[in-house]
Image (cartoon, rainbow, N blue to C red):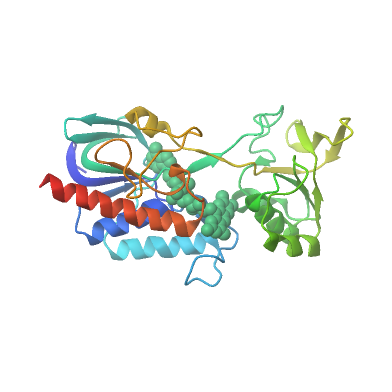
């Protein structure tokens, strides 16, 4: 691609929101580029099963994202993978994007931020040291290596329950550990969790992860406040997400109190020409919502660009 190329819309992040925004922008005959720092799919690619996206009765998250990618290619857009937008600046009426720290610079008339979220850390001793050695944040990515082993899933929200069910199919023993008195997962998870080998431990706080070359166990405190140990081979942490808001901060966009990008109903941010969609806006973190807001953001970007002509 040419240095200092100028395009209509640069979309950052090829999760559900970014893919949908690219699809809608391209159908409006805009020149589009879609940048993805990792691989296409975002969080949805990690879902073991997706059952709540209308029109798709049941599909593996990775399969669903593959189908979205194919649909996008039909429209002539290919997500550029391993292409992180490392800088973004407003220069006059244009935005200058820096890809992979100087590998490429391009000018865009508008930007749609779809940077989603990342895993929240437990911040306990052993977590960083044993990352990749039994500590993980992604059951779909790293889980298969734990076949016939014992794992602890930390955090009993929907993502944690989803991970625990995945492990129940392959592991010897699965603990689902929750800090609060009650788990946060939806009622649909109750029955399958009971039917499988998952042992739910509430009022339990993980205070450390043990092991040298690999995880051997966790240290935790329950209601008794005594420190106890549990032997496990893997620890999968699902205690929520935080926004990937670095670019939004660089642009000086208005963020809400939790660090998510503030948008109006048309997915406009506080800066003219910049739109945001999906989990980065702090909306309900669901595929259908990310898709809907990606569509709105691209449509609003189109309206904005029409006004520039
Ligand atoms: C395990 C799991 C299971 C789930 N199951 C379901 C389910 O069954 N049903 C449902 O509706 N929802 C589910 N969700 C939630 C749903 O997946 C998300 O709400 C939705 O996918 C968010 O999409 P997004 O495009 O906004 O963000 P993300 O999916 O987070 O995508 C953002 C993308 O932006 C990229 N990125 C970030 N910064 C940059 C940068 N600077 N440059 C380039 N790229 C960048 C990231 O790498 C990422 O690929 C699940 C989530 C998880 C984690």
Residue 199 at what x, y percent from top left? Answer: 82, 52
- Towards the viewer: 239 or 40: 239
Considering only vertical position in the picture, is 60 above or below 220?
below
Which of the 4 image quadrants contains residue 128? top right
Which of the 4 image quadrants contains residue 291? bottom left
Counting every numbered tag in the picture gives 0
Considering only vertical position in the picture, is 170 above or below 228?
below
Considering only vertical position in the picture, is 9 above or below 169?
above
Point 47% across, 48% down: residue: 283
Residue 243 at what x, y percent from top left? Answer: 49, 38
Residue 261 at what x, y percent from top left? Answer: 41, 38
228 vs 175, left or right, is right
62 vs 131, left or right, is left
Point 73% across, 59% down: residue: 170
Name the outermost residue toward the front: 265
161 vs 54, left or right, is right
231 vs 189, left or right, is right
Residue 144, visible in the rendered structure: no
- Towards the viewer: 155 or 168: 155
Which quadrant of the rendered structure holds the N terminus? top left
Which of the 4 image quadrants contains residue 235? top right
Residue 39 at what x, y percent from top left? Answer: 44, 49
Point 70% across, 60% down: residue: 187
Point 35% across, 32% down: residue: 253
Residue 250, visible in the rendered structure: yes
């Amino acid at each position: 691609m040419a240095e200092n190329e100028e395009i209509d819309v640069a979309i950052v992040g090829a999760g559900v929101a970014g893919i949908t925004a690219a699809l809608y922008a391209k159908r409006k005959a805009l020149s589009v580029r879609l940048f993805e720092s990792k691989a296409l799919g975002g969080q949805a690619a990690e879902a073991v099963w997706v059952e709540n996206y209308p029109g798709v009765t049941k599909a593996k998250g990775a399969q669903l994202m593959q189908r979205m990618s194919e649909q996008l290619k039909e429209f002539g857009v290919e997500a550029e993978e391993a292409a992180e937008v490392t800088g973004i600046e407003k220069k006059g009426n244009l935005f200058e994007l820096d890809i992979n720290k100087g590998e490429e610079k391009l000018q865009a008339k508008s930007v749609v931020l779809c940077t989603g979220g990342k895993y929240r850390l437990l911040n306990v001793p052993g977590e960083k040291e044993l990352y990749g050695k039994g500590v993980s944040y992604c059951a779909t990515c790293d889980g298969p290596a734990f076949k016939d082993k014992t794992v602890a899933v930390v955090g009993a929200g929907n993502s944690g329950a989803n991970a625990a069910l995945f492990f129940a199919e392959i592991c010897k023993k699965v603990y689902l550990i929750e800090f609060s008195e009650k788990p946060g997962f939806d009622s649909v998870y109750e029955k399958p969790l009971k039917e499988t080998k998952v042992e739910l431990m509430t009022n339990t706080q993980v205070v450390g992860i043990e092991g040298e070359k690999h995880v051997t166990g966790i240290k935790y405190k329950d209601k008794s406040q005594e420190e106890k140990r549990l032997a496990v081979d893997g620890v999968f942490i699902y205690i929520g997400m935080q926004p990937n808001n670095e670019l939004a901060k660089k642009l000086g966009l208005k963020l809400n109190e939790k660090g998510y990008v503030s948008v109006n109903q048309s997915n406009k941010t506080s800066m003219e020409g910049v739109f945001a969609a999906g989990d980065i806006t702090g909306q309900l973190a669901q595929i259908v919502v990310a898709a809907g807001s990606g569509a709105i953001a691209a449509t609003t970007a189109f309206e904005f660009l029409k006004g520039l002509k």
